[in-house]
Image (cartoon, rainbow, N blue to C red):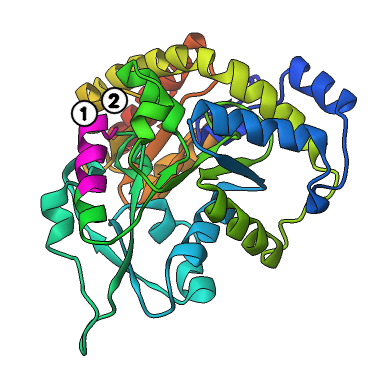
Amino acid sequence: MRMKQAIIDLRSDTMTQPTDQMRRAMAEAKVGDDVYGEDPTVNELQQRAAEIFERPAALFVPSGTMANQIAMKVYVRPGQEVICEERAHIFNSELGMMAAFAGCVVRPVHAPDGILTWSLISQQLRQPGAKYGSTGLISLENTANFAGGTVYSPKATEEICKQAHTAGVPVFLDGARIFNAAVALGIGVADLARGCDSLMFSLSKGLGAPVGSVLVGKTDFIEEARQVRKMLGGGMRQAGILAAAGLVALEHGPANLPADHENAKFLAHGLAGVSGLQVDAAKVITNIVLAETTNSGFTAPDLVKRLAERDVRANAIMPNTVRFVTHRDVSRGDCERAVQVVREVVAASYATN
């Protein structure tokens, strides 16, 4: 009988467990009613986030999806369009909430490696008229999750924002993993987001907090966002217990990201050596690795199922694409074992076919 081993969970960087420091901070947090703006720990988190991104205000919310959809509701009128890359989280992973809640529709654009340019966006702009819904918002995603954690450069973002504002269209940044992007480029997150009208970032992904995301922007945007958060049931009352862990993540989480990126590169090179898988290791610069299974004898869901039987967890994000995500709770040794398990599972498939 095979001995049970510790599970290596590469499904997402949301899988991290709170650190001892986070747990202490949560236990000791000073709290108040945040719906009244009276939770001191939430207020501290929001103030610190605004400072880091060099913006006037910020708002703590339960999830990245809520943060994104709050922004859609604030910026876009019913019937308008939101331009985003075709693999964007707001389009693929938020249950059609833009249509259900904000009443807007997506105009998806394919971009190489998930990174939009103004030349691609400009072809899709719609002015008010008799045939099309007008463009209400441009949404960028940095890093581009389903494109393999690819990164917008400051220059690329700046060009899009400059041209969009000339056209009278605001730009929102889904920066769920913007700290990963900043570490990969060796610059500050404020510089990476400059020019965007507002943004959100996740505390519960690479930074390792158990819960939460933060919206950042101008004061009037955040004031309206607070109202929309309440509409969505996001008034969390004594939320300082959660914000305390978020503060620890915000201050200490970025220091862990270089190791995550190095582990992802190691994992990518290892998987690229597995016969039957296609992995472009050269494109892995943050913490996400994509493996194409077309020539392996497996669909992505089938491979994920077989790996789980061997205590390695990953996500099938498309019929023939498996995503592996490194994070604080995955070591180099875990990556080595994951590569070995993948190699053995795929080799066994070849042996039986």
- Residue at image location 82% in from the left, 27% down from the top: 26
Residue 56 sits in quarter: top right
Residue 152 falls within the magenta-colored stretch: yes
- Most frequent secondary structure within the magenta stretch: helix
Name the amino acid type tagged 1. Asp
Between label 1 and label 2, give the one nearer the viewer: 2
The residues colored magenta run 151-162
Q: What is the quadrant of residue 49 in the picture? A: top right
Disc 1 residue crowd, few under 14, some 14–19, many 20+, Cα 10 Å: some
Q: Is residue 226 left or right of residue 270?
A: right
Residue 321: tell me if it is visible.
yes
- Give the distance between the C-alpha atoms of the residues marked 1 and 2, in whole angstroms: 7 Å
Residue 236, given in percent of the width and then of the height, sits at 79, 51
- Quadrant where the image shows the C terminus: top left
Mark drawn on residue 168: none
- How far from the left and from the top, in percent, is residue 25? 81, 22
Image vertical order of residue 324 relative to residue 228, above or below: above
Residue farthest toward the bottom in the current orientation of the protein? 130
Disc 1 + disc 2, Cβ < 8 Å? yes
Residue ID at (20%, 22%):
282
Residue at x-position 85% and y-position 28%: 29
Q: Secondary structure at mark 1?
A: loop
Q: Is residue 251 left or right of residue 93?
A: right
Q: Kindly identify which residue carries mark 1.
A: 280
Quadrant where the N terminus is found in the figure: top right
Q: Which residue is mark 2?
A: 284
Residues 182 and 144: in front is 182
Q: Amino acid at mark 2?
A: Val
